[in-house]
Structure formats: C-alpha cells, structure tokens
Amino acid sequence: MVQDDIACPGADRPLACRRHPMTSRNDVQEQGTRFMSLPSRAGRALAISLSGLVTLAQPALAQPAPVAEPRLITMQGEGQAAANPDLAVVTGGTQIQARTARDAMEGNSRIMRAVQQALREVGVEERDISTSALSLQPTIEYQQNTNRPRVVGYSAGHQLTIRVRDLAKLGDVLDRMVTAGANQVDGLQLTVSDWSKKVDEARAAAIADAKRKASILAAAAGARIGRVMRIEEQGAAPPRPMPRMATAQAARADAVPVATGDQNFRMSVTVTWELVD
C-alpha cells in the first residue's frame, strides 16, 4: 500500500520530501534531518580551521621588532711616566777558605758580623739587611798518581742583600762593606721604591691617548664618542731594575760615582666606545 505524498513547501518537491515506496512519514523526516545536518557539520569544521589559523598567526604577530646593534669604535692608546730611581739594591758578601768546615764557617761569620755592623753605622736600617745565600762546600783536589779526589779544605760563603734608600750614601756603603771584610760585591740595581703610582700615571695617559684619537676619527665621520663599552690593558709589570756592575776593588775607591738616570713606565690600553650622532 502506497502512502500519500508528504506535503512540502514550495512548488518543487525536493528529493528529501518525496515519498519512497514502503517508507513512512517518520522515515522521510529522519532522512531529511540527516540530509539537512550536513551543511551544519561542514560549517563547524570550517570555523575550527579558521580559528586554528588565527591562533597560529598570533605568535608571529607578537614577536618584537629587532633592535639595531650600537655603532662602535675601538682605539689603542699608549702612555708612559718617568721616575728617577730612589732605591739601590746591593748584593755582596764574603767567601773564605779554611782547613776544616768549622773554621770556614766561624771565620765567615766573624767577618759578616763586622760587615753588618759597618752597614748599620753608615745608616742602613736593620730591615734593609738580609741574608740571600749561605754556602759551605768542600775543596777537592785530585791526586796526580791515582786521580782520586781528596778533600783539602772547605769554602764558606755568605751573601747579603742590602737596600740603600739614600742614594747619596751609596758610595759610602760600598766602601764600608769592603773595609769591614766583604770580598765580593756581585752587583748593584737601581729601581723605584713605589712604582705603582707611576704605573697609574701611565694608565691615565694611555686612556687619554686612546680617547683623543677616537674623538678625532669620530668627528671626521660626523659622529662623536659616547659611553665606554670595553677596556683592555696590555702589560702592567714594573720596569726591570737597571743593573750596575760593582766589584770589591771598585768599592775601595775614594768615591763611587753612580748615575741613576730615569726609568720609564709604559702602559698600553685598548678602549671601545659607542658612537652617537
């Protein structure tokens, strides 16, 4: 038995509204519901896709703009400061021979006590007198027939390091040492006692030199130097003491002329500035 057609709006009767054999009104309505629900599902899928695109695009839009790197100028500077030496370092002492080790050590000690007393009398302070070396060695001879070594005596040595802070007394110090019995004056060095101040002066001069040259180049390029970005220092060691040769024979002279001269303290720096308009 065929049921009547289902009434549908409009002149045309869509496929979903047409009656199918052996179908009821409820079946037709259920099919129509499934058919009409397809566009709604597709719309929801499209909305989800668009929402995802917007979400993915948000991080890219939130990134900050790149910051331009500062313009820099790097320049090296040299500086120096001169100073006249005010300290003399003398090394000298005694070296004696004796038949026994005891005699060598006792004889050496007796002479060194006299030398140290003479240094104190000429104005050298106790803190400026120190023992820098002490030695005792056997004296060896080889027999002619057997070539065997034989101890024939002992040699004792005692070396002092003396700091003379008043260079006007240097000649007198050397003379009194030798007169008291010192038979070795190994050397003399002239230096600056407080060299750190001169190094600081050389540092300041090096910075000023680098700044002067950087300012000239920046002005030629239509800019000027701004804040300091980096400073590097090359070399901060004190100058080596100036050696002066001295011997016990020379120290016996009536006058020991000592030409001190100047010592130069040199520093080098590398400075980086920011360039500004």
Image (tube, helix red, strand yellow):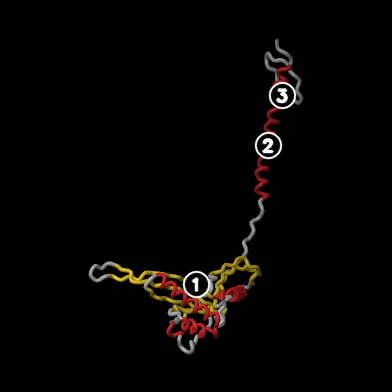
Question: Which disc number belongs to residue 48?
Answer: 2
Q: Earlier in the sequence, mark 2 or mark 1?
A: 2
Q: Is residue 233 left or right of 159 when viewed as pictured?
A: right
Residue at 48% across, 71% down? 132
From this viewpoint, is residue 82 visible?
A: no
User: What is the CA distance from the residue labelled 3 to the residue labelled 1?
Assistant: 115 Å
Neighbourhood count class around disc 1 (C-alpha, 10 Å): few under 14, some 14–19, many 20 upward: few
Residue position for label 1 = 131
Tag 2, which secondary structure? Answer: helix
Give the percent coordinates (x, y) of residue 248: 44, 82
Tag 3, which secondary structure? Answer: helix
Tag 1, which secondary structure? Answer: strand
Is residue 118 placed above or below 134 in the rendered structure? below
Along the line of sight, which residue is nearer the eye, 250 or 44?
Answer: 250
| Three-letter code for the amino acid on which mark 2 is drawn | Ile
Residue at the left extreme, as displayed: 145
Q: Is residue 164 left or right of 51 when viewed as pictured?
A: left
> How many numbered badges does the structure rendering display?
3
Question: Which disc number belongs to residue 33?
Answer: 3
Residue 69 sits in quarter: bottom right
Q: Earlier in the sequence, mark 3 or mark 2?
A: 3
Whether pointer 2 and pointer 1 mark residues with C-beta atoms closer than 8 Å, the reply is: no
User: What is the CA distance from the residue labelled 3 to the residue labelled 2?
Assistant: 23 Å
| Three-letter code for the amino acid on which mark 1 is drawn | Thr
From this viewpoint, is residue 38 visible?
A: yes
| Three-letter code for the amino acid on which mark 3 is drawn | Thr
Name the quarter where the C terminus is drawn: bottom right
Residue 83 sits in quarter: bottom right
Q: Is residue 101 left or right of 210 when viewed as pictured?
A: left
Along the line of sight, which residue is nearer the eye, 239 or 266?
Answer: 239
Residue at 66% across, 38% down? 49
In front: label 3 or label 1: 1
